[in-house]
């Protein structure tokens, strides 16, 4: 339920909740859904319910046992702000993040409206980053909502990028991650879409992180994610926000 991660912008994952509900186009070929069903078929007890939302209360306090500072992606296999996660459970997870102040926690949601609903009842220490997913222009409103939260770092995961976003709302945003889709049914991503967002970030002075091309390369050829790589215009874009004490994020 918590492990070293190969995700380029974090170091570890922590999943006090597993399973989710698909709510927008970026969810269509969800990697977590595929993985959960695979783990269910292998008999992994935590995934006995497959991708149905499941609380994992015995995992909540796990970060307290990690003494060495880590950058931790919260709920890589779910969404802490899913409407069926009880408020008290969300609050408990935030209390753990407050206590485990040696770590940096990256909370990513597709439900920023629930973050707004609950934010007054949650603590917001500097080690908790709050992000939302924006897969195309139709979901730019999520960026506007997440920008109003009191998190020390507010970020966007523009992955999978499914179309051009000519005016990505960046006011109040501290970091932008962009990536293409992986998996057997991956949809293509145009290099021009990525360059346009990189330019918007540059103009706004916001760190830009290019995570991957995914299963379809810059040339439009379907290959392994590793073979397609992470370079954009001959450069690897690994910019992080400065407001952190984590070694991973030191420029």
Image (cartoon, helix red, strand yellow):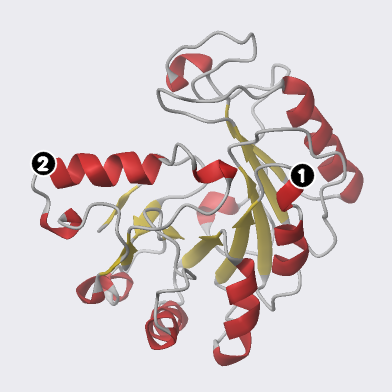
Separation of marks 2 and 1 at Cα, in angstroms: 38 Å
Is 71 in front, or is 173?
Answer: 173
* Residue sitting at the far left: 43
Residue shown at 46%/14% (left/top)? 227
Residue 181 % position (x, y): 53, 31
Residue 44 as seen in the image, left or right of residue 141 = left
Crowd tier of the residue under label 1, counting other residues whose Cα lies within 10 Å: few below 14, some 14–19, many 20 or above = some
Q: Secondary structure at mark 2?
A: loop
Q: Secondary structure at mark 1?
A: helix
- Say if 79 sits above or below 88 in the image: above
Residue shown at 69%/22% (left/top)? 232
- Say if 138 sits above or below 235 in the image: below
Q: Residue beneath label 2, please?
A: 42
Q: Residue beneath label 1, please?
A: 137
Total numbered labels placed on residues in the image: 2
Residue 109 % position (x, y): 54, 61
Asked if the residues shown at circle 2 and circle 1 are in contact, with their CB atoms under 8 angstroms apart, the answer is no
- Say if 229 sits above or below 198 in the image: above
Of the image marks 2 and 1, the number of the one nearer the N terminus: 2
């Amino acid at each position: 339920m918590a492990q070293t991660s190969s995700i380029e912008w974090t170091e570890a994952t922590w999943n006090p909740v597993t399973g989710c509900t698909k709510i927008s186009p970026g969810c269509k070929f969800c990697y977590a859904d595929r993985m959960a069903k695979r783990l269910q078929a292998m008999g992994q007890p935590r995934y006995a319910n497959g991708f149905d939302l499941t609380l994992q209360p015995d995992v909540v306090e796990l970060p307290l046992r990690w003494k060495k500072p880590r950058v931790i992606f919260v709920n890589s296999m779910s969404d802490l702000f899913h409407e069926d996660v009880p408020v008290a459970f969300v609050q408990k997870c935030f209390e753990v993040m407050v206590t485990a102040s040696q770590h940096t926690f990256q909370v990513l949601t597709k439900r920023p409206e629930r973050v707004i609903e609950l934010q007054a009842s949650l603590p917001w220490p500097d080690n908790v980053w709050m992000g939302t997913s924006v897969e195309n222009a139709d979901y730019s409103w999520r960026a506007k909502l997440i920008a109003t939260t009191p998190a020390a770092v507010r970020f966007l995961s523009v992955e999978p990028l499914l179309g051009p976003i000519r005016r990505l709302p960046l006011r109040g945003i501290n970091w932008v991650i962009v990536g293409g889709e992986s998996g057997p049914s991956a949809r293509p991503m145009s290099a021009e879409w990525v360059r346009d967002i990189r330019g918007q970030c540059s103009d706004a002075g916001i760190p830009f992180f290019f995570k991957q091309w995914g299963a379809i390369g810059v040339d439009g050829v379907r290959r392994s994610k590793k073979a397609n790589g992470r370079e954009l215009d001959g450069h690897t874009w690994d910019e992080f926000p400065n407001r952190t004490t984590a070694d991973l994020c030191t420029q």
